[in-house]
Image (cartoon, rainbow, N blue to C red):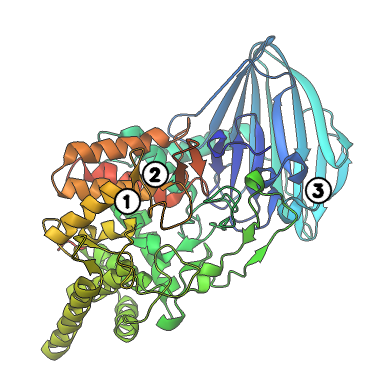
Amino acid sequence: MSKPIEDYALIGDRRSAALVARDGSIDWLCWPRFDSDACFAALLGDGRNGCWRLAPRETPQRTTRRYRGDTLILETTHDTGSGRVRVMDLMPIGTRHRAVLRRVTGESGSVGMTSDLALRFDYGTIPPWLRRAERTVCGVVGPDLVVFRAPIDLHSADDHVIGEFTIEAGQTLFFTLQYGLAHKPEPAPFDPAAALAETKTYWRDWIGKFCAPTDWPEPVKRSLITLQALTDTDTGGIIAAPTIGLPEVPGGECNWDYRYTWLRDSTFALTAFLNAGYREEAVCWRDWLLRAAAGVPERLRTMYRADGARHIAPHDVPRLPGWENSQPIHVGNPAASQFQLDIYGEVLDSLHLCQQAGLGDRPWDIAIETELLVHIQKVWRTPDQGIWESRGRPRHFTHSKVMAWVGVDRYLKLKDMPSPRRRELEALRERIHSAICRDGFDRARNSFMQTFDAPRIIDASLLMLPLVGFLPVEDPRVAGTIKAIESELVEDGLVRRWSRADGPQEGAFIACTCWLADCLALQGRHRDARRYLERVIELANDVGLLSEEWDTVQRRMLGNFPQALSHLALINTALGLCGPVQQRGGG
């Protein structure tokens, strides 16, 4: 049986990540990179698909967990009839260790424990060849090598590595799982206590740089830590989520792979980093963005691997049952090759934001910006798949056209240019604006619409119109759009992407709820804006993590987890409601 998504906590080392369930089982881990094949995949099946459970033998009477202060070190405490035990889980930060470290400490009494390790490579389907030496077990499949070291005796049964032990009050034991390459010597043991201390120091020092005023410091800090955990330490690329296959609609086919970096998230991420005081991280993200955007604009991808590689070949994994039998499970993402017009405006908006923040331009930056602008001139009239990556026929999505307008507008703010060229681009900006106001607005409903050819349908992406400066929030057309979204898309205090009559029966979209809060703040409705933000904060699980969506009927998380865009939206809204911040399109 699938575990609730909210039962999971995240650990990671900024190269890969794992999900730890409340019951002490690590059910998801991809090694050595975020987008590598999983060697634990019980998240999308069960224990037969790979996991590492370290927990009391008897069912605990009570289990609680938390992150150790402002870190990504997870502590889970189990109370049993015979005593209390605490398990600490982390992935050590630093270049020396590619590992999972688990520390077991007896708090009181005497607790019988079990460590049950089931390595399953190729997304939970292939057990490795195991070899044992004393209290060390090596697993090998193809290029991959995993070394398990334990302070207890181990035995093998049905491709599981099992150890049973009793932990006494005051006793501490360390277990380590390390990744290596099969054709090289196995990784040497490391000092677990030193790795724990180093990792604790890293996270506390990093979040210690946070200096922005906010009425919600703990959710913001947890969101920043989560965002940093999803940022590749070598390249600065930010993945959307560390998981695949967690459905938008349980039992449906929208079970996508989110372990990639979307250009669309660029401005949201820059705004969050800059407003939270993380200029160095903003520069790293800007540089990643420019490297990805370099080349031929018509071959710009909607998403990339964290290292900036372009090829994301999609295929399915039919042997995994799926979360609540949601199949097929897609590896890779076919949306990578879609034409999505809005991404060109997003990149130019990001670069304009960098200029506002004083991050500066370099000669090759200017060349990339000009190429993107020229491409917008060519393609802005072309239908696309839109922000929600529609799998249907291309449409003239209003949000996409707005972002094309944003691209031209920001380029005009970025550059000094000869007067004839400026007049040409100003005329183009006005043509795009006029087309959107003419074809994307339904006068009868006093609202902008999802597409130019579907006057009945609104969607939450229209909340971006005032946020990117397309029209002022005081404009009656914007006010009408916000009112329509509040009336038709709000459910249980949250915002759906579209109405139940117009799209799949998915959950409410967490980021969209924050966008509505941002719009209400612009309207001066600060009490309502705070109410929507606090509704989002309520949705976080017990360790402060958010998924992509919230099922308002079953009252549970849906979608890939934890979701960077949800945490980015929380950061931006929570900071925006509490003081002067860097705004999109300002200046």
In the rendered structure, are the residues bearing label 2 and label 3 in contact, judged by CB atoms less than 8 Å apart?
Answer: no
Picture coordinates of residue 417 (x, y %)?
A: 16, 84
174 up-or-down from 515: above or below:
above
**Disc 3 from disc 1: Cα separation:** 41 Å
The quadrant in which the C terminus is found is bottom left
Q: Residue type at mark 3?
A: Gly
In the rendered image, the vertical position of residue 275 relative to residue 1, given as above or below: below
Question: Which residue bears the numbered disc 1?
Answer: 272
| Secondary structure type for disc 1 | helix
Q: Position of residue 183 (x, y in %)?
A: 79, 60
The residue that label 2 is drawn on is: 224
Camera-side residue of 115 and 58? 58
Q: Which structural element holds mark 2? A: helix
- Label 1, label 2: how far apart the Cα atoms are: 8 Å
Classify 10 Å Cα crowding around label 2: few (below 14), some (14-19), many (20 and above).
Answer: many
Q: Residue at 39% of width from left, 46% of height from top?
A: 510
Q: Is the N terminus in the top left, top right, bottom left or bottom right quadrant?
A: top right
Point out the tag, 1 or 2, that comes first from the N-terminus.
2
Residue underneath mark 3: 139
Q: Residues within 10 Å of mark 3 (few under 14, many from 20)?
A: many
Determine if residue 199 is in view. Answer: yes
Dot 3: what SS? strand
Q: Are marks 1 and 2 in contact (CB under 8 Å)?
A: yes
